[in-house]
Every structure is written in structure tokens, then in C-alpha cells.
Amino acid sequence: MAEASALATQPPAGSYSQARFTGYGGSDIHLVPAPPPVVEANPVMARLRDELERLGTTYRDFFDTHADMDPRAMTRTKEGWAVTWRRWALDDLTDEVAEQRNVYVIHRGDSFQHRLFLDRNGRHLLAVQPQDPFSAMRYRKLRPDQDLCDLYGPFARLSASPRG
């Protein structure tokens, strides 16, 4: 047993040279970790992460006082909904999202505010009602053949303002 530990502590033989095995001067590229790949951040996803971080610090006191509240009930508060829909959007959206718009759906004389996420081709990916945590349409992930107006009915249309 003592012989094994003595062999382990001895330096390698005199003829050993690391350059002999690597071939180019003494460092083994397989032992050096590769640099992390350069990740081009999606601006929409980065904005959502920044908003989520900012809201987390802004509403820190609210979340600390309501820590024992049911998570489902928390999504029904204005503060909880502001954080929740951003978390869900970060989970549901991929790098294919290219744009985010604030739009209004005009339907039967009423206007409903949505934040709409689109891909590069203008296809609707996700619709969120950021100001209305009680709405039935508060968070909808849209199918490839579906747009936001399809959720409301045949006479719904999109507008940039609430008056249409």
C-alpha cells in the first residue's frame, strides 16, 4: 500500500514532455474548456426578461406580504398578473418571435387591449391582456392558422387605438 502511494507522488519519468503528446508546444486543447458560444439575444425576449426583473424588484414588498397566498389567486391581482404573464410568455415564446405590438380588438362596439407577439412573417403567436387579469382572453397562445380576431368572432378587427 505504501508503494502505491509513493508511486503516485513521484514525478513522471525524465523523458516525459507534454509537448511531445500535443504536438504544438505544451497545452492540450482537449483539457481547456471551449469559450461559450456567442448568443445573439432576441430583443423581444430580452425586453421581457428586463421587465420581469424590474417588476420583481418593484413588487418585492407585495410578494413578501402575500407569500402565503394561493398562486392561482395571486394571478388575479394586478401585481401578480404583471409578473405571471411575462413568466408564461418567456416559457411559451421561442426565438422565432420578432415583434411585440400593443393592439386593440374592436368587437361589437367594445375595445379590448392586447399585447400581441408576432413572428417575422407577421403570424400571431401569443396574445395577452396585460391590464385585465379577470378576462377569459387574458392569455392565449395562438395556433399557426389562427389570428387574434378569430378568438372574438367574425366581425372583430384589430386597431391601433381603442376608438378603432
Image (spheres, rainbow, N blue to C red):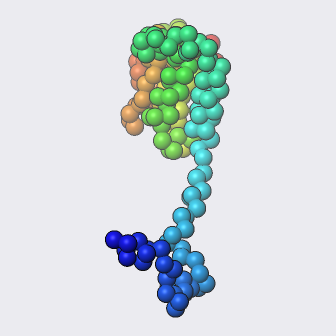
Which residue: 51% across, 44% down?
95
Q: From this view, report whether residue 119 is shown above or below residue 82.
A: below
Residue furthest out toward the left: 1
Q: From this view, report whether residue 147 is shown above or below residue 37.
A: above
User: Residue 63 appears in which quarter of the rendering?
Assistant: top right
Residue 66 location, x and y as percent? 52, 10
In terms of depth relative to the viewer, which is nearer, 61 or 22?
22
In terms of depth relative to the viewer, which is nearer, 74 or 132?
74
Residue 8 location, x and y as percent? 43, 74
Q: From this view, report whether residue 146 is shown above or below residue 132.
A: below
Which residue: 46% across, 34% down?
91
Quarter placement of the N terminus: bottom left
Which residue: 56% across, 41% down?
98
Apparent side of residue 116 relative to residue 1 in the rendered image (left or right): right
Apparent side of residue 90 relative to residue 163 in the rendered image (left or right): left
In terms of depth relative to the viewer, which is nearer, 111 or 81?
81
Q: From this view, report whether residue 2 is shown above or below residue 102.
A: below
Quarter placement of the C terminus: top right
User: Residue 136 appears in which quarter of the rendering?
Assistant: top left
Residue 24 in view: yes
Which residue: 52% across, 40% down?
97
Q: Report the number of numbered marks.
A: 0
Residue 134 location, x and y as percent? 46, 9
Residue 133 in view: no
Residue furthest out toward the bottom: 15
